[in-house]
Image (tube, rainbow, N blue to C red):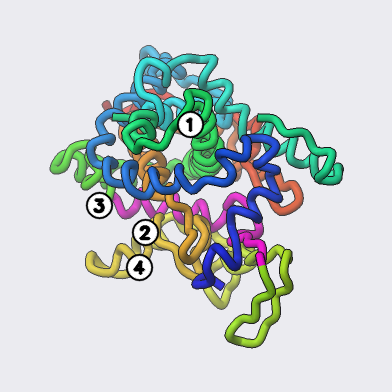
Amino acid sequence: MASISETDLSFMEAASDEFKLEHLVGSDVKDSAFNVSIIQTQLSRHLASLCPDIKDEIVNVFNELLDITGNEWKTVPAFESVCQIVARACNRVFVGLPLCRNSGWNDLNIRLPYAIGKEALVLHFFPSFIQPNLQNDFLQWCLDFGKESSQMLQIHRIIDLNFAANGTVTNIFTQALYNLAANPQYALLLREEVERIVKEYGWTKEALGKMRRTDSFLKETMRCEGLGWLTVKRKALKDIRLSDGTFIPKDTITQVAMGGIHHDPDVYDNADVFEPFRYSDLGGEQEGSKYQLVAVNSASLGFGYGKLACPGRFFAAIILKMMLAHIVSSFDVRLDENGPPPKNVVFARSIMPDPKARVMFRKRADQ
């Protein structure tokens, strides 16, 4: 299935059916691969040069949100705080200063993924014929690409990009933060790695690529927690017969049971146990890339699989690793209430972190 063309087994059509994209973000955005092209070329190409801006924004927003003086503990709502941090960090790249620090703009993009999810759920109850039709940064790359014809379409594309990025990165990082706060013993190992590598390479893309424990902590969080039970959603645009003889009729929606694979004891040792350095302990320097956060294969499906694996996963990994590296190098973290990580909220096939749990921060005690 991973090798079948988008014209036969379509991710975009499946996503459009699920989230009612034509009605909620507009047909111009829904029917275009423009954002994907920009992500695959301009965004990925500029990641190294973007790292200083991303780090600057993460430091800035943490300082604003926590406002810690002395060595006291500061308690914050984890999910709400991560929403703000991710929106600021992503939009430093998408729209740049000063708009990335505009509270109205960020609130819009924070609420958007969840609002679209709710609206799409409601629209599923109506037949298609009565569904309403609601209509050095990413914005500059869109203009440079020479295909934008209206300011409104440019705005639609940026909002669409926020929809794709903010909810995903926020959920993953909130889950990782809960795992870190519930297991502060892991922070020391992460901190040692971050300080050693940053001392030699600075806060650069190259440095982040060498933080294998940090990478593993996030990848194991995605394996154990994840964004949902199913992935690699596709819609058959014609009758398809697979190489093993399986027949997929036109208009069928296909998915892969990611949760079952990620917790399969035949695939992973201690499959139901969170082992933060599971992946960094696998392979040597030469083989490490096989187990990186951005690597996709039949046993690691957090970012999809095949030709249409998430094109923004390299950007997401930069944001995730920069945030985790900044936290362990700057703060001590613990849960507001001692115990295991807060339980996820599960709705149908979707998974999201507890939106009400609180986490405590203080400046590192050893500084």
Graded by Cα atoms within 10 Å as few (under 14), some (14 to 19) or many (20 or more), the crowding at tag 1 reads many
The numbered mark, 3 or 2, whose residue comes first in the sequence reads: 3
Quarter of the view holding residue 88: top left
| Badge 4 amino acid | Leu
Q: Are marks 2 and 4 in contact (CB under 8 Å)?
A: no
Kindly identify which residue carries mark 3: 210
Question: Mark 2 falls on what kind of element?
Answer: loop
Query: Residue at the spot x=36%, y=59% of the render?
Result: 292
The tag on residue 282 is 4
Q: Is residue 36 above or below residue 156?
A: below
Q: Nearer the viewer, mark 1 or mark 2?
A: 1
Kindly identify which residue carries mark 1: 158
Magenta segment: 210-237
Magenta-drawn stretch contains 236: yes
Tell me where residue 123 appears, x and y as whole percent. 80, 40
**Residue that extends furthest to the left in the rendered view of this protein:** 200
Residue 235 shows in the view: yes
The tag on residue 292 is 2
Tell me where residue 125 appears, x and y as whole percent. 86, 43
Question: Mark 1 falls on what kind of element?
Answer: helix
Question: Mark 3 falls on what kind of element?
Answer: helix
Q: Nearer the viewer, mark 4 or mark 3?
A: 3
Give the CA distance from mark 1 to mark 2.
28 Å
The numbered mark, 4 or 3, whose residue comes first in the sequence reads: 3
Q: Is residue 67 above or below residue 342?
A: above
The numbered mark, 4 or 1, whose residue comes first in the sequence reads: 1
Tell me where residue 74 appears, x and y as whole percent. 49, 20
Tell me where residue 297 appears, x and y as whole percent. 46, 68
Q: Are marks 1 and 2 in contact (CB under 8 Å)?
A: no
